[in-house]
Image (cartoon, rainbow, N blue to C red):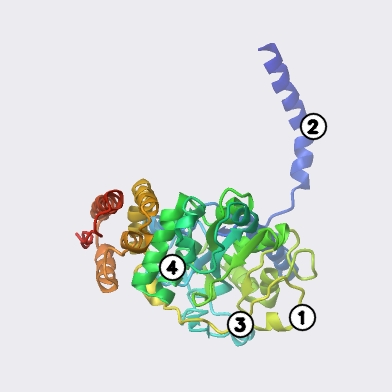
Amino acid sequence: MRYLWLALFALLILALAFGPQIVANRPKTDETLNIISPHWDGIRNEFGRAFEQKYFEQSGKHIHVVWLDIGGTGEIRKWLDQRMAQVKGTGKSVGADILFGGGMDMLPGMAAKDYFQPYTPAKEIIDAIPESVNGQELRDKQNRYHAACLGMFGFVYNKQVIVEANLPKPQTWDDMGQSALQGWITCGDPGQSGSLHQAFEIVLQAEGWEKGYAALTRLASNARAFNEGGASIPRDVSLGQAAAGPCIDFYASAPVRRQGATHLQLVIPAGATIATPDCIAILKSPANAPAAEAFMKFVLSEDGQRLWYQPRATEGGPQEYDLERLPVMPSTYEKGYPTNTVSNPFKDKASFKYDGKKAGARWNFLNDLWKSLWMDTHEELWSARKAVVAAGRDADLGMALAQPPFSEDASFKLAAKTKSMTPDERNALKNKWVAWGRNWYAQIEHAAETNGPVPVITVAPSE
């Protein structure tokens, strides 16, 4: 105890001696700007630093960007729903000024709920950023949200693991569901990772409901587990803890470049490729509206767009982190800036036309369905697929296992229906899906073990 008191006394002396100096060395702050974002620390640090510097140059005021750590897009959506309900009609802020990150399938729904304050960019920005690219809108017609950058989706695999384990090299989404890869796939929770959900939605639209859902379910049956976010996937693959996993391009690009093309390979599957917008918006009744507008202007300006595009430590680029996102300003690609980026979505032809309204209409419904039939029943799904592979019947029972539980038309009707359900009603329906999934997977497993016929699937519960 005596030594504890001596230690505490020493800490007190240090605080008295150096505390005032520490406070004195802190940069002066005249204002704060509160931002919620699913973006990783590199994006936060680079845009926070660059904006603070630009704001001081333009206003003579020191501003501190505060990044509120809410979580991924799923948690942010829930947080905003709760906070907006609390302040509705009061004119008060939710406690954040900016939402920085989120797709066009997420933000339109929030805009419809009046979560955003419109921001009309200056003419030079409107002239420099087109309204759309390959059928995808880059700004809301009422200026409630804007695309800040673009991303492409695919998967990454570890070449060394593939060779040493004698595994097939995946080149398509269907390849990710090959029986030889069971246990070698890592995956995130699409309900927690907006980028992963977007990737899966692209598969559904590019391949069609029946084939796309089957490809994703077979991928899920190969997954060892489901992590929370998408950023962990390329890390697991790069460490050799998995052979492959789905991810957005910029999550994989840095590990691929760092470890070399001989070690990791990023695949953007042909026929299921499109650059999708990642957006930014000013939240309703921001506490610091002028700074929020200044941040919007910075992100959409050439200075902000170059941060996405250029390598670190280049003039006009990021300082510490390579962000490697695709700018929404076409001229950024054409001015000869140094870059590691090889894609140009304004010149590369899209392989299909993505329907953002379709994606938004079934976003929450698919998250509930996938959680019920892939994650909450993962042990049963895994066991059924393992039995199917052992029986050598992946061609018939394996494909039956991965059938969607509804037709696409029925799924849209149910998606609309679930929007008006109470939380208890939705949970009750999800529990019924879990029970349905366990029963269906058990039927498949039994058929595999007894060499029985392919069971006839029944439609999953809708109420």
Give the secondary structure at mark 3.
Answer: loop
Q: What is the x, y in percent for residue 28?
A: 73, 53
Q: Locate the N terminus by quadrant.
A: top right
Tell me if residue 381 can be seen. yes
The numbered mark, 4 or 3, whose residue comes first in the sequence reads 4
Compute the Cα span from label 4 to label 3. 25 Å
Q: Nearer the viewer, mark 2 or mark 4?
A: 4
Is 414 rendered above or below residue 133? above
| Residue carrying label 3 | 122
| Residue carrying label 2 | 17
Q: Residue shown at 46%/53% (left/top)?
A: 182
- How many discs appear? 4
Give the left or right position of residue 368, taking residue 99 as reference. left
* Observer-nearest of 299 and 84: 299
Q: Amino acid at mark 4?
A: Met
Q: Amino acid at mark 3?
A: Ala
Q: Nearer the viewer, mark 4 or mark 1?
A: 1
Asked if disc 4 and disc 1 are in contact, CB closer than 8 Å, the reply is no
Compute the Cα span from label 4 to label 1. 34 Å
| Residue carrying label 4 | 106
Which quadrant holds residue 396?
A: bottom left
Give the secondary structure at mark 2.
Answer: helix
Q: Amino acid at mark 2?
A: Ala
